[in-house]
Image (cartoon, grey):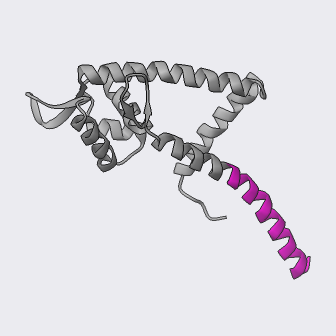
Amino acid sequence: MNDTENVIQKNAKYHELDAKANIIYKFVMTYTDYIKTARDYGTGETINMMEVHTLTVIEENPGITVTEVALEWNRTKGAVSQIITKLEKRGLIIRKKEHDNAKNVHLYVTDRGEVLSKAHKDYDIKELTWADRTLHKSFTSEEIDVFYKVMQQYTELLDMPRQEQ
């Protein structure tokens, strides 16, 4: 194969792979905007998805620590601490030091936080059921299951160290 053919072949391969990567990129960017958008989950209070999901992790795991939340969400303790501070300022959670170990701070939802977390779960059931029904108009259950399996594997792939080819 001569140099010109090699360049043409490389360009074709690049465009083929780039078209696939752009589908993922567009999804990630659209979903990122969706996550960052504050919404009312049914309590009259607006909150974004990362905050409400963090609240729900705390509601379902009373006494969890910031470190444990960070591990759950694959985020730094600093990033989670910022969310925790926002939730605390809004009166949705409280921090408590345990008597037997004053070093560790444990997180608990307030009554208001519990109401919002439960409203969030109801909201998600409706939204995810709608999304599932809508996807089933175009895809079989098996195809949707494969999509989620690929997404899971792709997420793990992104965490893998890169190997030279």
Q: Nearer the viewer, residue 15 or 10?
A: 15
Q: Is residue 66 left or right of residue 165?
A: left
Q: Position of residue 79 (x, y in %)?
A: 33, 48
From what the image shows, is residue 155 above or below residue 98? below
Foreground residue among 26 and 12: 26
Residue 54 appears at what percent x and percent y? 36, 33
What residue is drawn where x is 58% and y is 24%? 128
Q: Residue at x 38, y 35 (%)?
A: 47
- Image label count: 0
Compared with 126, 31 (above or below) is below
Where residue 154 sits, quadrant-wise, is top right
Residue 150: percent from left, percent from top: 66, 38
Whether residue 74 appears in this view of the structure is yes
Q: Residue at x 90, y 75 (%)?
A: 5
Q: Would residue 24 appear left or right of 81 to someone viewing this image?
A: right
Compared to residue 29, the image places residue 65 above or below, namely: above
Magenta span main SS: helix
Q: Nearer the viewer, residue 12 or 48?
A: 48
Q: Is residue 51 left or right of residue 27?
A: left
- Residue 60 seen anywhere in this rendered image of the structure: no
Residue lying at 33% horizontally and 19% vertically, measured from the top left: 115
Tell me the magenta residue range: 1-23
What is the quadrant of residue 121 in the picture?
top left
- On whether residue 12 falls in the magenta region, the answer is yes
Q: Quick check: is 152 in the magenta stretch?
A: no
